[in-house]
Image (cartoon, rainbow, N blue to C red):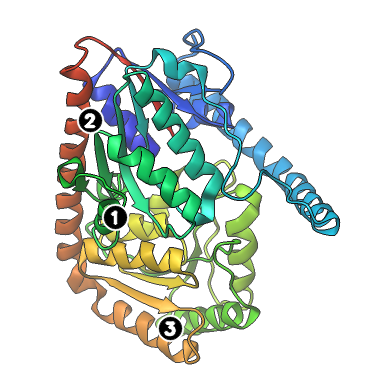
Amino acid sequence: MMAVTVERLRQHWPQARIGMLTSEPAILRAMVPAAEPIEAARPWGRRRRLPGRWGSDLAGPVALRWRAATEAPKSRLRTLRAAVADEQGTPPTAPRGEPATLIPVAADSASLVLALGGGYMTDVDLYQAHRTLDLLEYAQRRGVPTAMIGQGLGPLRDHRLFDRAAAVLPKVEFIALREGRRGPDLLRQLGVARERVMVTGDDAVELGYRMRRDDLGADIGLCLRAADYMQISDRSRDILGTVVRARAADFGAAITPLIISEYDDEDRRWTLPLLRGAARVRRPIGRAGSAQEVAGQVGCCRILVTSVYHLAVFALAQGVPAVCVTASRYYDDKFYGLADMFGAGTRIVHLDDEALAQVLTEAIDELWRTGAGSRETLWCSASKQIEASRAGLNRVFELVDTSAPGAWQAQGIR
């Protein structure tokens, strides 16, 4: 994730100004103190004087709790706006495929524009996809080197987005993919030269791998998240909760709720109700928790059941097998790509399966029984991905070091 990438950038360029485009500057300052928040309409600001550790210790919990406290009203407001727009027959945002974006002024003085890892170059996130392409194109026109790392691409069935990507991505000097199942072929269709592409895995693999434990965990980790791009039926949700509670009871295991996103309470709102009636339940990380704390919780689990991609990354990188549940093509691509990267310890279950209870039970039982034997394979796969990811970033460093030695100003977008 972005903390790992920023750490690597800082190691290579100790004096660099690393700016990140964000809508939540306080949280970015707290969680990634080595980066500077960038707002679209403002140039690079002064370096803040508050030391990074103090900034994180003081601002982190406050910023995260404030976001958590205000997210519910914001969510209700979004719902109300959408309802009003539906009644009026008008879209609540910019026309589909033509979202309005602002180019950050800081891009003019950047030595590198780097699109950080994520699964946003897809139909399900048109605004973020177009915003990224607009920024990359803006930098290219000004001779600023551009690169993308940790990318999960597609699906790209929206014709406008596909055409836009085909106009911009072939000019990106280097693209690192987090999976090799669909991404390379999609880039080929978009006209990107093969020599500019490398499959490296996700940057978050290193965070999980660092936290691996010698002893075997004892819990079942659980996180369910639903969204517009992954609709989950009441039937599927109820079956999932029933099966996980039953398997935990039979194993004598506690269920650990794993909360990684506080946006719109999407993890808590869908996960915590599944715990009702469970014999043993761990406390979730608080709202001011960090990704490192969540990864630590994952390491205490013997298996993970989740619909969340990065939780599966944290688990597999630590040698914890994962049952990945999916209800959309978008997540099919994510999880099958992840399974290919690790080669073991993964079972993918489709939530619309008519035999969901049986299939899910069998997947959990199998990984609970055999998971310990896959740890070495998972660790080996994680180590190779970390090596590849670092090699990919070295190619990014070369874009700046060879074209503008001593230039230390980088801008990231996420």
Task: Specify whether 364 is left or right of 225.
Answer: left
- Element class at badge 1: helix
> How many numbered marks, from 0 up?
3
Whole-angstrom CA distance, mark 3 to mark 1, is: 36 Å
On-image quarter of the C terminus? top left
Mark earlier in primary sequence (2, 3)? 3
Which dot marks residue 396? 2
Q: Amino acid at mark 1?
A: Gln
Against 322, residue 190 (above or below) is above
Q: Mark 2 packing: few (<14 Cα in 10 Å), some, or many (20+)? A: many
- Front tag of 2 and 3: 2
- Front tag of 1 and 2: 1
Q: Quadrant of residue 270?
A: bottom right
Against 50, residue 167 (above or below) is below
* Residue that mark 3 sits on: 360
**What percent of the width, then of the height, locates residue 15?**
30, 12
Q: Amino acid at mark 3?
A: Leu
Task: Specify whether 99 is left or right of 334.
Answer: right
Q: Residue at x 68, y 36 (%)?
A: 66
**What percent of the width, then of the height, locates residue 98?**
58, 43
Mark earlier in primary sequence (3, 1)? 1
Q: Amino acid at mark 2?
A: Val
* Residue that mark 1 sits on: 189
Q: Is residue 104 visible?
A: yes
**What percent of the width, then of the height, locates residue 170?**
29, 40
